[in-house]
Image (spheres, coloured by chain):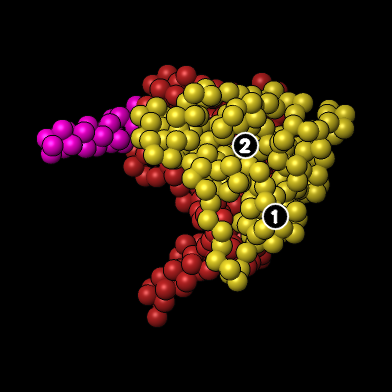
Chain colours: A red, B yellow
Amino acid sequence: MFRPLSAAVAAWAAQSALDPCRHATVLRKIEEEAPGVATLVEYDPVWRGLPLPAGLLSAHEQVGSHGQASVLYDAERFELLHPELALSEMGLQIPGYIRSANLRAVEAAAPEVEHWSLRYGFSGGGANVMPKSSCVALLRQRSDRKLLLVMAVHLASAPPSDSATVYKDLCCKSLKQITAVDP
Amino acid sequence: MQIRCLQEEIGGLCEQLRSRGLSAKLLLGGDFNAMREELLHGNGDAFFGCAAVAATQPPWKKPISGSEVTAASAGAASCRMADDGSGALELLCPQADGGALREVSQPDAAMAVGCTRAGKSIVIDFIFCGSVGCEAELCGGGAEQWASTREAVSAEQVRRAADASSGIYANVLEFGSDHLPVACELRL
């Protein structure tokens, strides 16, 4: 009884391993769809360390973000307008991610200061609420210079039986973290 | 509250673009961790009264009696259904053309079962499109004129993924993830 069970568990562990199985499966789907733009979430450092499809590797670039969200785009078709470029060319202030109300206010007053709530991963409670991961990228189509503002988001998870309280949990965790760092 | 934050950020970006005489298309995609009905109605009685919610497998549990819930009015302040009968969700954004971004990924529109999160018959991953400064080009229309759903998965793949007992297993083998991809076609 245990031998077939053990074999099935081992087979599942191998098939569900990120590298090479799941990574290869995701790459196959991306190659099949060949998107001009893709928004990714839960795109963590392990994923970021793995290659993009060979045919698209040189054509796609990744954009930085808050948390584990990212935007991929076809660099032959689109040009990324980095925040500095968007500001100097068009006077636009493009954030790298979706900010809380408090972060927006703080950055408007002193854009060079990194806010403590972002530094400590705080994302709970009223004006401090923000998606747990997000990425904002302003792209310009090379052929006609049309603008495309792309946003990838991952909102905090909770079942409907609990969704009104998830922010309190995040708030408590973050406060504990802050207390531990800055007693 | 996260949706509200999202609306405010997008609204601010639209204001910046519009005030500088620029036009742009907007693309918002990701895991919203909520069904359309929850975004529309919160998680109180209005949510649990929806047919799609009642049909979800495995069924949702209701909040414990007396616990705090998100009121239906909060949902109404952030989202609405498109008025063309398409079933598309719209994320309200007064600063965008037409006052909203429109859902352009409806993997469940023509399927008996909807699923973007394996192991449950729920759609929680969406792509919304909108624009700013494009009123003349769109002639009163919305994102449906330049963006449409792309069928990235088959009905059979969705049915397999939605299965409560084997859905995650099947989906990891099929797509390498516990989520299904959603996609749309854009014509900028």
Q: Residue at x 67, y 51 (%)?
A: B49
Residue span colored magenta: A1-24
User: What amino acid is labelled 2 in the image?
Assistant: Ile
Label 2: chain letter: B
Camera-side mark, 1 or 2: 1
Q: Is residue A19 magenta?
A: yes
Q: CA distance from mark 1 to mark 2?
A: 24 Å
Looking at the figure, which quarter contains the C terminus of chain A? bottom left
Seen from the viewer's position, the closer of residues B32 and A71 is: B32
Q: Residue at x 60, y 52 (%)?
A: A98
* Percent of width and height locating residue B28: 63, 40
Above or below for B127 versus B150:
below
Seen from the viewer's position, the closer of residues A76 and B129 is: B129
Residue that badge 1 annotates: B46
User: What amino acid is labelled 1 in the image?
Assistant: Ala
Above or below for B54 versus A79:
below
Say which element carries label 2. strand
Looking at the figure, which quarter contains the N terminus of chain A? top left
Contact flag, marks 1 and 2 (Cβ < 8 Å): no
Residue that badge 2 annotates: B127
Task: Classify residue B94 as left or right of residue B166.
Answer: right
* Percent of width and height locating residue B42: 66, 56
The overriding secondary structure of the stretch rendered in magenta is helix
